Amino acid sequence: MANPSSIRLLVAEDVPQVSQHVRNLLSVQEQVKLLEVLNDGSKVVEAAKQLRPDVVMVDLLLQGKVKGPQLIEKLRDSGLDIPVVVLTVPQHPLARDPARGIDAVLTLPFSGFELVNTLSHVLADRQAGSSGACRVISVFSPKGGVGKTTIAFNLAVALGQMGVATALIDGSLQYGDLRSLLKVPSDVPSILDLPTDRVQESDLRDVMWRDPAGIDILLAPPRVEMAEMVTARDVEKTISLLRRLYEAIVIDTPTTLSEVTLALLDGSDIVLSIVTYDSTTIHNTIAVAEVFSSIGYAPEKMHYLLNRSDSSGGIGREELARSLGRRPDFEVVSDGRLVVQANNEGMPFVVTSPDAAVSKDIQRAAQTIMGRTAGAPVRH
Ligand SMILES: Nc1ncnc2c1ncn2[C@@H]1O[C@H](COP(=O)(O)OP(=O)(O)OP(=O)(O)O)[C@@H](O)[C@H]1O
Ligand SMILES: [Mg+2]
């Protein structure tokens, strides 16, 4: 049940009298904290990303570039998973419809009691509906061949082995690295087989590939030229729906920072950036960290995983930490024989050799990401 004293509310409202009414109702109580009232619908999703409210309230009749109904849709597809209460007037009746992103409806005029009650109920429903918050982890690097696919796959399987309901998304849409790693036949459906308008839970079940290792995988299209058919909006919607069904989502991403890659990263709670002791990788990682910071990614969203941590190539630990501005959060050792063989067989090494050092490193990262251990295991 939601703690009613902690409801953080963001409001999208452009009628001054209505904003004032809401402010007045909230000023005499302490259960709801009004974060901001925005009168421009185009700024709301960005503000929600920054402020992370518990609930967003949207006036159905909001005017401007992004009108009420569009804003409701944008919030639903944003991957933010924040419940939305829609405010309307008796002349424009509206029914609650969570599949369309309308978690509750408040019709003007309403009392302070109705307002607070509605907000606490949508929040409690949302918390009861999901068995805890879902963690979305994108495995990224601005340099190719550093181990993204290998780590994304084994991390997802390690999470599955911990009993966490896990989905893995093959975001390397052009080459479909996971499709080739797992030797999945080309007629197995992909993200392209999801309907473009309203994706339902049952549609997803038909498209996910059940890996014998216990996780569900959403594959990339089977052919290179099909990648461009997947839009940033498809990606946002997919993440938003998967969030409701899984406890963890791991995304294998491509090296290029396209609009679709950014949508994958935007929809993630954690960007796990893979670094190696390689000067180009380090240089590109720093460059891209500046981009992430300028587009507003919080420092807590960024995590670094040092892969092949025992192959320093002449670069010292301190030097790496100085360049990155922090120590890597995780380290994974090199194991050429085991990793290459497991990949060639399409098997997760965390299953075939759970006691190998490389597997232990991945298991530890999985546990830390789910908050099941105290701290990050980094060798100094
Ligand atoms: N810790 C490790 N120890 C040994 N070999 C590794 C390790 N991590 C990755 N590799 C090997 O490095 C190679 C590249 O790995 P992988 O394909 O996972 O990288 P990637 O970042 O996904 O590449 P791409 O940019 O092409 O998508 C593979 O041959 C893999 O077996
Ligand atoms: Mg790859």
Image: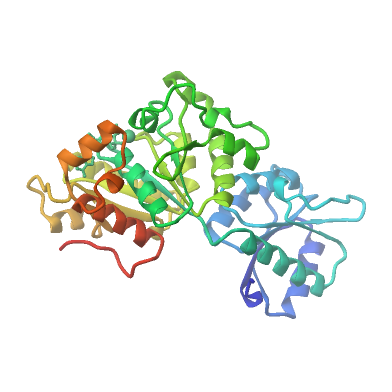
The quarter of the rendered structure image containing the C terminus is bottom left
Residue 133 drawn at (x, y percent): 53, 60
Viewer-nearest residue: 338 or 26: 338
Can you say whether 239 is above or below 111 in the image? above
Q: Residue furthest left?
A: 314
Which colour scheme appears in the figure? Answer: rainbow
Residue 53 visible, this orientation = yes
Q: Quadrant of residue 21?
A: bottom right
For image coordinates 66% across by 57% down, the residue present is 83
Task: Report the image quarter containing ligand 1.
Answer: top left
Q: How many marks?
A: 0
Viewer-nearest residue: 271 or 371: 371
For image coordinates 76% across by 64% down, the residue present is 19
The quarter of the rendered structure image containing the N terminus is bottom right
Can you say whether 131 is above or below 315 in the image? below
Residue 288 drawn at (x, y percent): 33, 44
Horizontal side, residue 25 vs residue 213: left or right? right
Residue 341 drawn at (x, y percent): 21, 35
Residue 132 drawn at (x, y percent): 54, 62
Q: Quadrant of residue 65?
A: top right
Residue 286 visible, this orientation = no
For image coordinates 17% across by 61% down, the residue present is 379
For image coordinates 41% across by 40% down, the residue present is 212
